[in-house]
């Protein structure tokens, strides 16, 4: 009998699936997808109340994806959580596949909203939270964004509105790299801007599920009407040593990876050194 | 000049209020509450009116979120340029996932903006028509509006508000429901040339038909209530009878009703179809009469086009 995998193991498996998906077609955002694996593990195994057997159930928390490049990470997470078969992952972004390059429609089990990039996720999430409030539902709406959101006027409009309307059911999870949120926004500036607009803010790591769970739980012990922003420091390409923009795994432009590169990358995620013999990888 | 969804008698506001009463999923999201319709809804259903004091793009996104939760949001009417200002949001957050969002376009056409070109959206129909799954209607009175609001609510809809004060039934005594299902109504039966139009230009078209009649050309005038889907049967049947047509509209020539009718005829029953429209121009400031004259959208221009089309018809 095997025990349930730990969060770290789950995130590692998600990363490996992400790499497999991207290696097959050479498409999809590798860096951001690897960066989001721990956050998605926290969301889907700990924070969100969901039932993969009933993906449209009223009594579920909702997620709005705000980064198209991170779609492979969401797909790998949904498959592992049991929304659909992992086999679907190997058709990612192919003609006729359920898992299109980005989730633009609502045909994928577990996808609650169309992809809402460039700060739009908060606008859509705001509408959903208003709808839930009107229905008397206590369920949450999580908007998962990347650091690009900070520069978008629509994001700040959404921030202002969620704060002004007291939408305590909204949680914005912003994955930003540790080098600073953007050239224009330092993490502390972003934090004070959010607080000024009526938000609670948690600055934390985006790579430790236990810490995330504990800190967010502490934060939410008292239910308030203030929306919650989780500013999660994340590293692009977490788990794999990517050599910046020059890394050839960023430059496949629709061509599948070399099998050797895939095998090496998977071994690296598993924490095995290069040259370890290890079993030949299988999908 | 009507800038919003309202009329002198208040019938339009009452129609919306009645729809809200019948179906509690209706919500109104608007970036302004200054217009009569917004005020009427807010007065009757304050909790179902959301003033999103921001960009039109935020209004559309909020509506998409509400639609995802099973509501029927209508967007506008205080945002006349919703189509141009929020096109990408309409496309990605509403049309692609096929959400039942109703877009109240009050800025379409030439005669809506005293301020001139920026406020006269003369390309709205082309923008909305080309979005897969988007339906486009021209409600010309409260009874047609009521039928549109009754549903079905299975995807996005754009309304170009085109009141012109005509009777609410067609020449055959048909009901607004029947007219909407047919996609339009025959305002004047005729056998020599089909004049197809919508909104304020229907009145001009009827006058043009009178002039043509005195010249011995018996024109049929069709008022379109639906643009997409196009009332193909109605237009084809008329085109088969008359053998030539004119389409008049407050829209640029490209992508409007004239283009749609020409495409239909080219595909199914090739006959000459001439367009009376804005040929490659934005609008400008001016009175309604001045603009119509300047941009060649008068009854005289329709008569000229009809005579030309009539002389081009096969065997003519």
Image: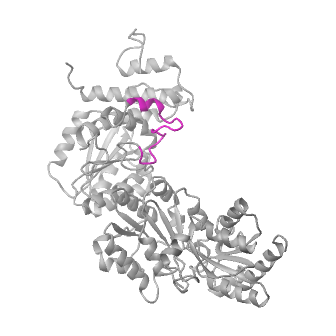
Horizontal side of residue B114 vs A201, given as left or right: right
Horizontal side of residue B200 vs A259, given as left or right: right
Q: Nearer the viewer, residue A98 or B116?
A: A98
Q: Quadrant of residue B53?
A: bottom left
- Is residue B106 visible to us here? no
Residue shown at 57%/28% (left/top)? Answer: A255
Horizontal side of residue B131 vs A231, given as left or right: right
- Is residue B182 visible to us here? yes
Residue stretch rendered in magenta on the structure: A86-107
Residue B266 picture location, percent across and down: 73, 61
- Magenta: main secondary structure equals loop
Q: Residue furthest top?
A: A277
Residue A179 magenta:
no
Residue A236 picture location, percent across and down: 41, 34
Residue A105 magenta:
yes
Residue shown at 70%/76% (left/top)? Answer: B194
Instruction: Report how many numbered discs are placed on residues in the image.
Output: 0
Q: Work out whether B191 lies above or below A200.
A: below
Q: Quadrant of residue A47?
A: top left
Residue A249 picture location, percent across and down: 51, 27
Residue shown at 36%/15% (left/top)? Answer: A272
| Image quarter in which the C terminus of chain A is found | top left
Q: Work out whether A141 lies above or below B118.
A: above
Residue A19 picture location, percent across and down: 43, 27
Q: Residue furthest bottom?
A: B214
Q: Quadrant of residue A251?
A: top right
Q: Nearer the viewer, residue B178 or B145?
A: B178
Horizontal side of residue A95 vs A166, given as left or right: right
């Amino acid at each position: 009998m095997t025990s349930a995998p730990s969060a770290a193991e789950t995130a590692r498996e998600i990363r490996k699936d992400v790499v497999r998906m991207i290696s097959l077609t050479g498409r999809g955002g590798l860096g951001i997808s690897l960066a989001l694996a721990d956050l998605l593990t926290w969301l889907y195994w700990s924070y969100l109340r969901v039932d993969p057997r009933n993906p449209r159930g009223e009594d579920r928390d909702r997620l709005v994806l705000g980064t198209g490049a991170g779609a492979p990470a969401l797909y790998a997470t949904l498959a592992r959580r049991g929304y659909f078969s992992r086999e679907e992952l190997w058709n990612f972004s192919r003609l006729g596949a359920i898992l299109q390059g980005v989730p633009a429609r609502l045909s994928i089990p577990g996808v609650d909203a169309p992809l809402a990039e460039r700060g739009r996720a908060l606008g859509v999430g705001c509408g959903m939270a208003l709808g839930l409030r009107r229905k008397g539902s206590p369920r949450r709406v999580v908007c998962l964004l990347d650091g690009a959101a900070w520069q978008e006027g629509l994001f700040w409009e959404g921030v202002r509105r969620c704060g002004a309307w007291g939408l305590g059911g909204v949680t914005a999870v912003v994955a930003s790299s540790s080098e600073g949120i953007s050239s224009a926004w330092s993490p502390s500036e972003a934090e004070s801007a959010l607080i000024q607009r009526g938000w609670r803010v948690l600055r934390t790591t985006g790579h430790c599920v236990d810490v995330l769970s504990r800190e967010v739980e502490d934060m939410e012990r008292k239910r308030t009407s203030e929306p919650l922003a989780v500013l999660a420091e994340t590293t692009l390409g977490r788990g794999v040593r990517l050599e910046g923009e020059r890394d050839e795994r960023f430059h496949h432009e629709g061509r599948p990876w070399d099998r050797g590169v895939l095998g090496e990358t998977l071994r690296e995620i598993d924490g095995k050194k290069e040259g370890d013999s290890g079993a030949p990888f299988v999908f | 000049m009507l800038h919003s969804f309202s009329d002198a008698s208040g019938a339009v506001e009452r129609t919306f209020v009645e729809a809200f009463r019948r179906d509690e999923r209706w919500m109104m999201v608007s970036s302004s509450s200054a217009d009569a319709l917004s005020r009427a809804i807010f007065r009757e259903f304050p909790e179902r009116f959301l003033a999103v004091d921001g960009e039109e793009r935020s209004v559309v996104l909020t509506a998409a979120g509400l639609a995802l939760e099973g509501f029927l949001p209508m967007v506008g009417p205080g945002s006349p340029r919703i189509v141009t200002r929020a096109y990408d949001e309409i496309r990605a957050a509403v049309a692609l996932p096929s959400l039942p969002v109703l877009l109240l376009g009050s800025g379409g056409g030439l005669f809506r903006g005293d301020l001139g070109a920026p406020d006269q959206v003369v390309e709205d129909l082309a923008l909305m028509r080309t979005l897969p799954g988007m339906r486009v209607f021209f409600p010309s009175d409260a009874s047609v509006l009521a039928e549109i609001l009754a549903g079905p609510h299975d995807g996005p809809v754009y309304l170009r508000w085109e009141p012109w004060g005509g009777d609410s039934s067609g020449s055959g005594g048909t009901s607004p429901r029947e007219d909407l299902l047919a996609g339009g109504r025959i305002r004047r039966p005729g056998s020599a040339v089909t004049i197809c139009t919508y909104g304020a230009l229907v009145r001009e078209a009827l006058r043009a038909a009178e002039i043509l009649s005195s010249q011995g050309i018996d024109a049929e005038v069709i008022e379109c209530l639906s643009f997409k889907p196009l009332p193909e049967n109605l237009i084809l049947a008329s085109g088969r009878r008359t053998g030539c047509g004119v389409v008049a509209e407050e829209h640029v020539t490209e992508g409007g009703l004239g283009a749609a009718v020409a495409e239909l005829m080219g595909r199914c029953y090739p006959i000459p179809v001439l367009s009376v429209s804005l040929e490659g121009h934005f609008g400008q400031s001016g009175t309604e009469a001045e603009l119509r004259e300047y941009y060649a959208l008068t009854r005289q221009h329709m008569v000229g086009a009809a005579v030309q089309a009539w002389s081009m018809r096969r065997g003519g």
